[in-house]
Image: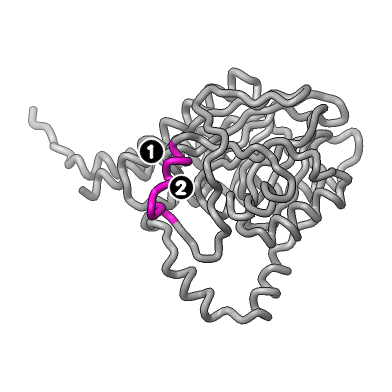
Amino acid sequence: MSTVSIPVQATDLQTAEQLAQQGLVAGKNYPGLTNLCALDKPLKQAGAHSHKKNTRKMTDQAREKRAKAATVAPQQVFDNLYFVGNRQVASWVIRTSEGLIMIDAMNTNQQAKKIIIAGMESLGLDPNELRYLIITHAHGDHYGGQEYLTERFSPRLVMSEADWRELEKPKQEISNPRWGKAPTRDLSVDNGDTITLGDTRIQLAVTPGHTLGTLSLIFPVQDQGKPHMAALWGGTGLNFGPNAERLAMYSSSAEQFRLLAQENQVDVFLSNHPTRDNSLARMKQLNNRNHQQTHPFVDPDALQAFALLRDCSQAQLKKLQASQ
């Protein structure tokens, strides 16, 4: 009996398509993640060149118009969790019995002052109670406002060792002239470390892929006193280009973090970009819900977001291998 030989490339492409479809089905509740599964689009390396060009052309009036369009009202999302970002990037604040923990600092000192701090104060949070600022990864849209926050309110600044080393290089992997100043080394954490402040314990996981030291977090939240567990994925985009090693890292990190989230009975998926986790839509739902309705951020299938991240990054890897 004769057999038909199937080219390796065809097999890899079929596997890629199957994985991408599997990821889309798993993460159907998180449409903001689905572009990771788009095999018809090239993986691009992010950089500063286009930003420099756009910055030169943009007038003050255009910048003001864009900033207004990005505006999102600050909001209390859980009893102890607050959103103080804009449409492009999130800053989350966790209230504990002994002070505040902030996750990410947006792009610039101006955003830190006019969006983060102004938002906190409008929600009744005292920025002088800020004790920790956790930077999820070494990209300036997450650390750019740290200078204003650290000089004004003196929180301890937390980042992974790998990403501290990235910022200490003469030239970073990704940069942008519009970002604020990079932080200087403060607290370095590793996979499995925790931060405890008062009644709140945050578990830290190093999930390399988006950067080599991306931090993802698991922490408790409450809805009208009812406990839930939230998992925040620290770096979403595949913006490191067609890099097989990084894609493999990303997929492995997503699976390991999924297992950790499962162990901790996570039922809330969060991101540091509000279009990724549907925060914008869910905050609107939260404003309109009655006391009988389930909290819109609470999802018994929240772990499926990590299945999408795992499968679709693996699909991109298979596609890349097929092209080589």
Confirm or deny contact between disc 1 and disc 2 (CB under 8 A): no
Q: Secondary structure at mark 1?
A: helix
**Quarter where residue 203 is shown:** top right
Nearer the observer: mark 1 or 2; the answer is 2
In the rendered structure, which amino acid carries the disc numbered 2? Leu
| Residue 170 highlighted magenta (yes or no) | yes
Magenta range is: 162-174
Name the quarter where the N terminus is drawn. top left
Whether residue 290 can be seen here: yes
Left/right placement of residue 154 relative to residue 215 reads right
Q: Please tell me which residue is depicted at 57% across the width and 54% down the height of the picture.
A: 141
Question: In the rendering, at what x and y percent does residue 66 appear?
Answer: 66, 71
Residue 59 vertical position relative to residue 174 in the rendered view, above or below = below
Q: How many marks?
A: 2
Q: Is residue 87 or residue 310 the one in the foreground?
A: 87
Q: Earlier in the sequence, mark 1 or mark 2?
A: 2
Q: Which label number is shown at residue 16? A: none
Farthest residue in the top direction?
Answer: 263
Q: Which residue is mark 2?
A: 167
How far is disc 1 from disc 2 in space, using C-alphas?
28 Å
Q: Which residue is mark 1?
A: 314
Q: Please tell me which residue is depicted at 79% across the width and 45% down the height of the picture.
A: 127
Residue 109 vertical position relative to residue 134 in the rendered view, above or below = below
Whether residue 40 can be seen here: no
Farthest residue in the left direction?
Answer: 2
Residue 277 vertical position relative to residue 198 in the rendered view, above or below = below
Q: Is residue 64 or residue 98 the one in the foreground?
A: 98
In the rendered structure, which amino acid carries the disc numbered 1? Gln
Left/right placement of residue 283 relative to residue 22 reads right
